[in-house]
Image (cartoon, rainbow, N blue to C red):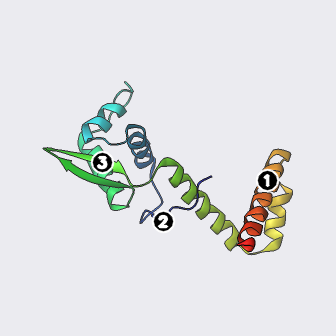
Amino acid sequence: MAPLPDYRPKQLSLGPLEAEILNIIWELGSATVKDVHDRILTDPNRELAYTSVTTVLRRLTDKGWLACDKKERAFYWRPMLSKQQSDVIKAHEQLQRFLAVGNPDVVAAFADSLDEAASEQIAAIAKRIQSARQASEEK
């Protein structure tokens, strides 16, 4: 997985429509309101006002997820982070919240509840952490 990015959005929490629109922007790379609106309306059972898309794009910009560029007469929104960078930041935040509990009994109870696949994954993570520590000590 990639290292923790230097840039971080001002606000990590996203509503369902914000997350959907952000995913569309990640897929397209850069998009206008019309591009996003048309993509959402490809679902025949879906209705969403054009102005609602504009509002969500502005909200995502305010939260630091998107940047807006004007090219000729159109506004184009582009992501400030890749999907992978976003996943790294979210995983880091979740881990920090988990570790903030600080109670070894809670952590032990969590570890006891893991299935074999999750336990193997935790062991692999621990091994990578140990390797990273050894590499940094050798510098």
Tell me how far mark 3 sits from mark 2, CA to CA.
21 Å
Above/below status of 93 relative to 26: below
Q: Position of residue 11 (x, y in %)?
A: 44, 64
The residue wearing badge 3 is 77
Look at label 3 and name its amino acid.
Trp
Q: Residues within 10 Å of mark 1 (few under 14, many from 20)?
A: few
- Between discs 1 and 2, the one toward the N terminus: 2
Which residue appears at 52% of the width and 54% of the height? 85
Q: Position of residue 19 (x, y in %)?
A: 45, 47
Quick one: SS at disc 1? helix
Tell me how far mark 1 sits from mark 2, CA to CA.
26 Å
Q: Quadrant of the C terminus?
A: bottom right
Which residue appears at 33% of the width and 33% of the height? 47
Look at label 2 and name its amino acid.
Asp
Quick one: SS at disc 2? loop
What number is the disc on residue 124?
1
Q: Quadrant of residue 133?
A: bottom right
Above/below status of 116 relative to 65: above
Q: Is residue 22 left or right of residue 38?
A: right
What number is the disc on residue 6?
2
- Between discs 3 and 1, the one toward the N terminus: 3
Above/below status of 45 relative to 121: above
Which residue appears at 35% of the width and 32% of the height? 39
Q: Position of residue 112 (x, y in %)?
A: 86, 58
Q: Position of residue 13 (x, y in %)?
A: 48, 59
Tell me how far mark 3 sits from mark 1, CA to CA.
38 Å
Residue at the left extreme, as displayed: 73
What number is the disc on residue 137?
none
Quick one: SS at disc 3? strand
Look at label 1 and name its amino acid.
Ala
